[in-house]
């Protein structure tokens, strides 16, 4: 076949080869990253309670301590002994001497009555304290998650407010430039608006950096990659329930706060150990039995009888002044120490409840004032001044100041909403509950 006849075939094969090669070498288009799922507050709390490693460690500790009481309440392991008695070393003959024996013995330590019960009670109270400590860590984790979540929510609303004000200031710049071009405005008005616009851009940079830090904190609490994306809902309930009955909250905290239950359990454990120290003046006993096998025969040809021995021993507290007395003094001091610590915890819990309630009530009143009074009035002022500026009845500087004031009020409103909910989270944790409300409708009995 001539080259002219092969050329079309070679050309077709080359085209097919390069088309396939280009298809292989071409990088696949990256798939778009999925939008992060909205992280509701209750979902964040549920994830943290399920996955937080610190909480899992406390749970494992509580489970380990729950196995201790039965160990402390059990008798010590008995002893089995195997002995060779009076074996002659000249012949090593088991039948030569009548006192040669092969012994099997069994003995049991018997603590003085009441000691095991007190040891088990002390361990049981320690186990109870560990369970309450687990609950305390759980409530603190919920409080921390809510705090970071609401901080992040404020940052998102602040960014949203800044973006909206950037657009408004751009409109002011356009109006100022238009008036300047037609000779009815001043160049300083344009420069002033651009300066305020630059300030807002600077705030955006700061808020975005703050948001990255808050996202990392929240992801750490949820045991998720710290660089993972987090998207919160744009709007949540902004109303605050009225909570005014501080006495009922304080009484509830005394009954249910885990830290106070931990303190009481430690006092009970210390009292049990004090009782055990007082029991140490009483001796412990050891009871045993030994069976001795003898081989060989007596002089009269009869088989040698085996021996049975019974043993009884007890310890003698002869050094009570240096041991038992000091142990009682030590345990007495520990009971007093735990009582003082519990009193201190009660004071701190009461202070936490009072501070959190005061912060909550203040935020509730401020949020209502901002939303119903200050912000609507400031918005009306800006709208009126913008209309007046367009007809040369209002100074541009006053217009910008009014807009900045509105921006500050809007930002402070979202800060107040965030702080109020954080105060509610602290108040809830301070009384030892996960929710202060009695039903799903948010109704409460704290008025």
Image: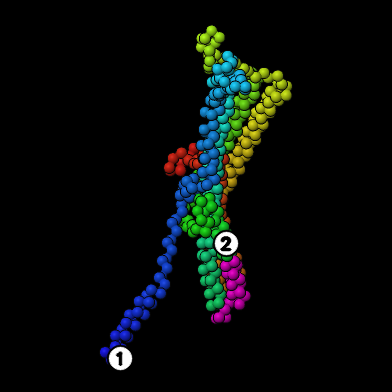
Vertical comparison of 356 with 254: above or below: below
Q: Is residue 393 above or below residue 341?
A: below
Q: Mark 1 and mark 2: span between their CA atoms?
A: 69 Å
Judge the density around disc 2: few (<14), some (14-19), many (≥20) Cα neighbours within 10 Å: few
Q: Position of residue 228 (x, y in %)?
A: 50, 58
Magenta segment: 180-202
Residue 442 place in picture, x, y as percent:
46, 43
Q: Secondary structure at mark 1?
A: helix
**What x and y, as percent, mark residue 156?**
52, 59
Towards the viewer: 138 or 160? 138
Provide the residue designation for mark 1.
3
Q: Decide if residue 297 is in sight here.
A: yes
Q: Quadrant of residue 268?
A: top right
Q: Nearer the viewer, mark 1 or mark 2?
A: 1
Specify the quadrant of the image occupied by residue 97: top right
Nearest the eye: 284 or 87: 87
In the image, what residue occupies the spot 73% across and 24% down?
A: 322
Q: Which mark is residue 209?
A: 2
**Relative to 395, does residue 329 appear above or below in the rendering?**
above
Above or below residue 179? Residue 102 is above
Name the dominant secondary structure of the magenta segment.
helix
């Amino acid at each position: 076949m001539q080259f002219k006849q092969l050329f079309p075939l070679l050309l077709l094969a080359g085209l097919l080869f390069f088309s396939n090669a280009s298809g292989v070498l071409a990088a696949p288009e990256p798939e778009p990253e999925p939008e992060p799922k909205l992280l509701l507050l209750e979902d964040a709390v549920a994830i943290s309670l399920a996955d937080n490693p610190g909480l899992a460690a406390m749970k494992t500790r509580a489970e380990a301590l729950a196995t201790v009481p039965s160990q402390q309440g059990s008798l010590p392991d008995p002893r089995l002994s195997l002995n060779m008695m009076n074996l002659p070393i000249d012949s090593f003959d088991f039948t030569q001497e009548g006192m040669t024996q092969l012994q099997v013995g069994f003995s049991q330590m018997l603590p003085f009555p009441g000691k095991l019960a007190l040891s088990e009670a002390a361990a049981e109270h320690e186990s109870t304290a560990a369970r309450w400590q687990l609950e305390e860590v759980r409530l603190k984790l919920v409080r921390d998650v809510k705090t970071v979540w609401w901080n992040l929510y404020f940052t998102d609303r602040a960014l949203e407010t800044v973006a909206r004000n950037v657009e408004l200031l751009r409109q002011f710049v356009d109006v100022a430039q238009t008036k300047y071009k037609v000779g009815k405005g001043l160049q300083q008005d344009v420069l002033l608006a651009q300066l305020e616009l630059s300030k807002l851009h600077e705030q955006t940079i700061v808020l975005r950096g703050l948001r990255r830090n808050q996202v990392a904190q929240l992801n750490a609490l949820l045991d998720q990659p710290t660089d993972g994306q987090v998207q919160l809902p744009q709007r949540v309930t902004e109303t605050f329930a009225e909570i005014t009955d501080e006495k009922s909250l304080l009484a509830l905290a005394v009954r249910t706060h885990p830290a106070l239950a931990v303190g009481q359990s430690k006092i009970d454990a210390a009292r049990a150990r004090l009782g055990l120290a007082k029991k140490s003046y009483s001796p412990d006993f050891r009871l045993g039995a030994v069976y001795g096998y003898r081989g060989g025969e007596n002089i009269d040809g009869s088989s040698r009888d085996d021996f049975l021995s019974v043993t009884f021993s007890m310890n003698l507290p002869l050094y009570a002044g240096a041991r038992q007395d000091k142990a009682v003094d030590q345990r007495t001091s520990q009971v007093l120490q735990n009582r003082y610590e519990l009193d201190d915890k009660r004071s701190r819990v009461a202070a936490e409840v009072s501070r959190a309630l005061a912060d909550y009530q203040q935020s509730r009143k401020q949020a209502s004032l901002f939303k119903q009074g200050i912000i609507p009035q400031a918005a009306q002022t800006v709208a009126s001044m913008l209309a007046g500026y367009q007809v040369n009845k209002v100074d541009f500087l006053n217009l910008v100041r009014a807009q900045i004031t509105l921006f500050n009020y809007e930002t402070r409103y979202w800060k107040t909403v965030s702080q109020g909910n954080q105060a509610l989270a602290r108040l809830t944790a301070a009384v030892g509950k996960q929710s202060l409300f009695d039903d799903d409708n948010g109704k409460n009995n704290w008025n």
